[in-house]
Every structure is written in structure tokens, then in C-alpha cells.
Image: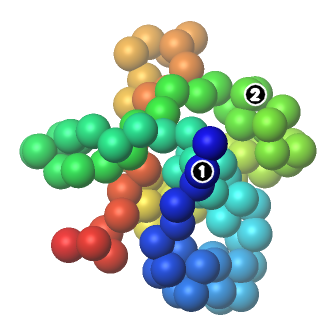
Amino acid sequence: MRLTLDRYIVDSLMPDLVGHDKQPSAFVVFLYLWSRATTRRGPQGMRGRRVVASLQQIALDTGLSKSAVQHAIRTLKRRRLIHAHQASATAAPDYLVNAPWRR
């Protein structure tokens, strides 16, 4: 399998999240979600990449702690890089990974 990244992710998003925000875990989680997502239509017809993953699964797969993943998810949601929807309190979230630089 081949992973394709937009240049923006490496050239702009990485220095912004890691250097400016001091959130390398947010960059790692974004890359994780990006790499596992498939392209679909999101809310209001916006194109995005969707993936369903629990916090525990993200933590196990990235080597981060669960609390670091939670903090990273909050950062990514605040920056509107992802949108999360949970069908129930115990369901794994469905993440829409946004690419706002493509608009």
C-alpha cells in the first residue's frame, strides 16, 4: 500500500503543529488518521477522509498514551483538521479528516 501526502502536510502543517503549537502528538495522530482514512463525502457535501478508530486503538498503533491521543484529538478538532462523530457513548468515533488547504 502506498501513502500519498499533500505537500502542505509536510511543508506547513508539520512545522505549525510541532513547532508553533508544541503538539507533535497532534501531528502523529493526524498522520495516523490520514493514512487509514478513505475519501468520502462528509457533512454538507465536503470531501474528506473518514476512519473509525477508538482512542485506545490510536494509542496502541502510534505508541502514544491514551491521554496524549485525547489531547491531540482536541487540538485537531479545535484547528478544524478533523471532525468526530460518535453514534453512542461507547462507540468508536468516526473521524472525518479534513484538508482545508484544498479549498
Which residue is more in the foreground, 5 or 41?
5
Residue occupying the point 60% across, 51% down = 2
Q: Position of residue 36 (x, y in %)?
A: 57, 39
Please give left or right for residue 60 compared with residue 98 in the image. Answer: right
Identity, as a three-letter code, of the amino acid under mark 2: Gln
| Quarter of the image that includes the C terminus | bottom left
Q: Position of residue 92 (x, y in %)?
A: 55, 20
Residue occupying the point 11% across, 45% down = 44
Tell me which corner region of the image, top left, top right, bottom left or bottom right, holds residue 13.
bottom right
* Colouring rule applied to residues: rainbow
Numbered circles on residues, count: 2
Q: Which residue is mark 1?
A: 2
Q: Is residue 5 above or below residue 65?
A: below
Q: Is residue 44 something that shows in the picture?
A: yes
Circle 2 — which element?
helix
Please give left or right for residue 28 compared with residue 66 in the image. Answer: left
**Earlier along the polypeptide chain: callout 1 or callout 2?**
1
Q: Residues within 10 Å of mark 1 (few under 14, many from 20)?
A: few
Between tags 1 and 2, which lies in front?
A: 1
Q: Position of residue 102 (x, y in %)?
A: 27, 72
Identity, as a three-letter code, of the amino acid under mark 1: Arg
Q: Which residue is mark 2?
A: 56
Which residue is more in the foreground, 38 or 99?
38
Q: Position of residue 66 (x, y in %)?
A: 80, 38
